Image (spheres, coloured by chain):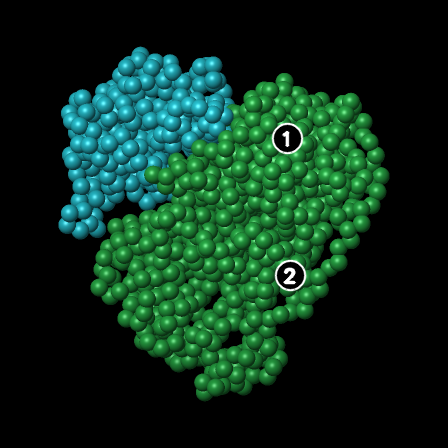
Chain colours: A cyan, B green
Amino acid sequence: MKADEVKVCVLRMEGTNCEQETFDAFRRLGADPEFVHLKQLEGRDTLAGENRSLDDYQILMFPGGFSAGDYVRAGAIFAARMKASSGRDLARFIDEGKAVGGFCNGFQIMVELGILPAFDSAMSEHPEAVLHANDSGRFECRPTLLKHVNRGKCAWTGKLEENEIRLIPSAHAEGKFMLPAERERGLYERLFDEDRIVFRYSDPSGDVEAPYPYNPNGSKFNIAGITNDGGNVFGLMPHPERVFFRNTHPDWYRRRVGPEEGDGRKIFESVLEYVMKRF
Amino acid sequence: MDVSHLFREMEAGTPVRVVLLSEASEDELGGISEIMGIGLSTEEMSRIRTHFISEGRDPTDVELEALGQAWSEHCCYKSSKYFMKRSFIGIKAPQTVIEGEDAGVVEFDDEHVYCVGLESHNHPSAIGPYGGSATGVGGIIRDVLCMGAQPIAVIDPLFFGPLDTPAEEVPEGINHPRFIYSGVVAGIRDYGNRIGIPTVAGMVNFHPGYTGNPLVNVGCVGIGRKENVIHSRVGGPGEVYILAGGRTGRDGIHGVTFASADLSAESEEKDRGSVQLGDPITKEPLIHSCLEANEKGLLRGMKDLGGGGLSCVSGEMALDGGAGAVIHLDRVPLKEEGLAPWEIWVSESQERMMVSVAPENVDAVLHMFRKWDVEAVVIGEVVEGKRVKALWHGRTILDLDLEFFTAGPEYCRIFESRKVDRDIPDPGIGPLPREKLEDALLSILSSPNICSKEDVFRVYDHEVRGRTVIKPYAGMPFSPGPSDAAVIKPLEDSYKGIVITADVNPYFCELDPYRGTLSAMEESVRNLVSTGAYPHSVTDCLNFGNPEKPDRLGDFERACTAIGEFARHFTLPVVSGNVSLYNESEIGKVPPTPTIMMVGLIDDIRSATTPDLKEKGNIIYLVGRTRNEMGGTAFFRYMGVECSCVPDVDLELSGKCMDAILEMNGEGLLFSVHDLSEGGLAAAISEMCIGGGLGADINIRRVGSMSEDEGEPMDVNEKLFSESNSRYLIEVPPQYALKVEDCLSRKGAPYTKLGTVLGDSLRITDGETILMDVPVSDLDYAWRNGLRKLMEGS
């Protein structure tokens, strides 16, 4: 496929609020993103021509925000509605190798949907992990350094070097990735062994055990983002769409000359390249 | 007083009462106003009686409630309008597109405008800090939205009593500053974060004068295409009113009347119902759907329901469009059954917008709202004539002449402007030994008004929308210092930026409202200029005490005059604003607090500058003139010296320094710029060191002696800690030094070469004498942990 043929579904509902910057990231790379309200997949309150099907797209994005206010567990309501109306379509979308991504609230939604970590199938019946309240007990909007630890599985980071560090900012109150305590050990081992960990919070020296504030939420093993077994589904707490350009980095003005490219751009380039090659 | 005999049921089955004003005595008029809680004076009630007698009938309770609201200080600015008109309303500037509607609209570039608004939510935040501040954010966002602009930034200047105020000093019925502070920050966090508009700037200020009455000011900036600017008025008769958004309930009843009276011990109990409840997850889709409908050209007029509710909005929109209106009150969706018609009419429930739509577009607009699950109903029509009518199941229960209804009283109350003593007493401090000076600096850096507010701005999402170029902090990513103003790049295809700051120093205003206000204007200018932007428009929020007391009104008059003089001198339009009076409690009035929010523009955001020091070996200059005017400064407060000689503003000098900095920055000569404000030179250079993680070696011998008209040499304390206006510190690479000195001389801006960026400590000498030498890590620790220590109570 060519870039301009790649259709990206930027899915939203009330409280989704990082959709514009997510949309912009794909559009700047020449892809064809579209805002789609969840109701357009559900076929509710729509006029002729407004309904959409996941089959029309190659990339599905769950943007950040506070879907439905996050008054229950973050992302729970979005996920429940999505699962009820389009659960099967979504599982098929994933099985076909199409790309699904979510940042921040998007990652929380994906975990609630059961499409991450998705240990045994494209979509588990119940959530298998949780993004719990930050250890600090509060919302944290701060720069974070991410070390790319993936060894090649993840379609969303194909253009990144292994062990390179990128500055991708965080802004969340519930980002502590946790697995069920009784099976924790084995599950973490699987994530590492199966190359399912994509990014870990790090300090400038590359230490992936660095504590707060480098690890903004207290995630075990400093896990910031993971992928599924197929490598096509990717969730990340920090916000790559906010650093598409250098000029939204927290310290761009400290260097007088430098690239215009921000640290988040390569993630969007990677998935686009993956889709263009595969379809 | 029993006035119950003056209320009569309108007719069986209609929950409306007729109020027999025609039969009431003067005393009883006051009694009616009191029992209804509408806050009108006997004189105003009497004027209303005369009006209704001329119409040959008595008013209904719905009508009286409507008038009480429309004629409140909050809605009609009856005590303040005179002074504002006289001083600063209507300053002609080419960039102004719309002044005096819900938000100011100003030209951004050939195709775009930006919108600005700033409002107070003081009394609600005193009673319900969480809900009060959240709905403050909601309200100001609606003001920007209803001009057809996409909100892109929230700014919140906040003023509290000291966090360590002993409980017994807090007046009865008033919450402790710590409770209010935590609640207000949480309210802004939860609301602002949920609707996805970044909170990018603001200030957190502490002063004992706010213990009885905190101030919560909230500002918003939006961006829109010129052709999408929509007025807060109907197009004309035949259009349909659609009410969209949240349901109407009993929250926020009498909110504006509550805002127009002093806070008392009973406020907590009595006025709780006046505090509105916010719902960001209704608001967020409301923003989308209103903007989408507007972009498609489906709307003729749009206005938000804020203070004044349905009553003010339906009347004002019609009148401004040269028409009248009929509203069917029984069609308004309610939060609960059983609201009386007057409650529906004046409720200030949140998240509601009124749009006026041509009949052929009604279905399309309703669909747009339905798509976003936003409730919307047709509630009335725009009609010929100049009356607004409200119907209850077909029965007319309100029928008001719009001119009378909206033309509230305007007073020029008695005011007394105070005389300020400009004598400078001998502070009796003398030269301080090195350790005392170092202590003074560290204490000032960790003091509540100067220390880092990181714990506040980190809980606000200041980066959502991905367009925040300069954030509330600047410097090393993991140990930044402060920034002077926030920079937003609002458009995809342009590097032009919007720069936003808000400022006021209540300590100056308390001692000298006139010079204090000038200083607030000048400091706002400095913040923008330091960032590389030219000042473009002003919005103000004037928080003062009870205007019925002549000294309070005198302070207000002085502040208005100062804003006018400054704005005229620089042709800066005051495009919107808000007045909040009656900020008093039993422990007295708040310090006069004219909060200034200023917007600047920068042609290319890539030339924005920040305060953090960038590179060893660069030269540091002080630009501007340092004077002995130490009244209200952080240093005098620290030393306990009373003096009312606060920093003055020399408008000519201010302009010269501004021009010089902007020109040098435009040429890329400045690596960092920071303005001098609280804590003076010593605090400013410390903040630059902290942000850059770099030290500096500076000599202050020549500070204050740079101009021939300066008489006495200044003492070290004054050089270090004077807070004279129009001053900047700049960091210049050695190869640009000549160019910089040439530009400063050419512009007539005084300057002193202070020293260089060097090492990892701040070393300040005066001639040969070492005044202080403090490791940057110590400066950093003091500054970064000031607020945290106060909150932890250690």
Residue B281, can we see it? yes
For the residue pair A191 and B191, the one nearer the viewer reads as: B191
Q: Which chain letter goes with mark 1?
A: B
- Considering the numbered disc 2 on the image, is that residue within a helix, a strand or a loop? helix
Label 1: element kind: strand
Q: CA distance from mark 2 to mark 1?
A: 38 Å
Q: Horizontally, is B61 left or right of B645 in the view? A: left
Quadrant of the frame with the C terminus of chain B? top right
Please give the label number shown on residue B557: 2
Q: Which residue is mark 1?
A: B621
Taking B438 as reference, is B535 above or below it?
below
Can see residue B250? Answer: no
* Residue at left offset 34%, top offset 62%: B301
Q: Is residue B332 above or below residue A40?
A: below
Q: Position of residue A183 (x, y in %)?
A: 35, 19
Front residue of this view, candidates B559 and A224:
B559
On screen, residue B552 versus residue B618, left or right, reads: right
**Left or right: A83, with B178 as reference point:** left
